[in-house]
Image (cartoon, helix red, strand yellow):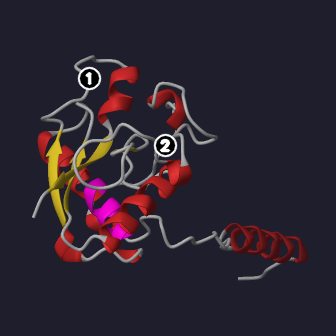
Amino acid sequence: MKFSLNNAALALALTTILLSGCSSTDEQDTGFTDDNAAGSGVSTSGTGDGSLSGSELNGGSGGANGFGGEDGMNGGGQGGGPNGTKVIYFMYDSSQVMEEFVPVVAAHARSLKSNSGQHVIVGGHTDERGSREYNIALGEQRAKSVARMMTMQGASESQIEVVSYGEEKPASSGHDESAWQLNRRAELDYQGR
């Protein structure tokens, strides 16, 4: 088999194109995202589809991220733990905590760290799309993502319980994107000990 100069140049050009397409980019790792969920069988792609921002999910009041007060906390909460937001929302088909909710999770972690008697149940929820089994797994991954962030910030694992409800306890009973956005969540339920 005999290569001509044109074939060699073509092979070199194709190799260069293929290799340049395989280069990796460094992503900023804040230590608060769910980088390990890929091996869990649950997709964490987080495909954006114009979902609500934190301010829209919280009624439009509050600071820059939609939540009033320091670290995304506002008044009016219930039970133990920090007052304010006890719901963390997620993108479609994702268990990665959105950047705007990182301060909310951090505030809950600080509260648990400073109050060793507190105990929180992190309930993972999904919208109605997907099989029951898939939604249970995705809800669990969402709850685990929040719990993992809190333990990374100093909360004790013994203070946090993870539960998945899948699609079984919707926040909104609608069957459209606005309802689904409210159902893709993890809820923090403080328990007395």
Asked which secondary structure carries label 2, the reply is: loop
Residue 81 seen: yes
- Specify whether 40 is left or right of 17: left
Discs 1/2, front: 1
Q: Which residues are magenta?
A: 142-150
**In contact (CB < 8 Å): disc 1 and disc 2:** no
User: Badge 2 local density, few (<14 within 10 Å), some, or many (20+)?
Assistant: few
Which is the main secondary structure of the residues drawn in magenta?
helix
Q: Quadrant of the image for the N terminus?
A: bottom right
Which residue is disc 2 drawn over?
A: 47
- Specify whether 151 is left or right of 58: left
Q: Amino acid at mark 2?
A: Thr
Which residue is disc 1 drawn over?
A: 172
Which quarter of the picture shows residue 6? bottom right
Q: At 49% across and 43% down in the image, what residue appears?
A: 47
Q: At 12% across and 58% down in the image, what residue appears?
A: 192
Q: CA distance from mark 1 to mark 2?
A: 21 Å
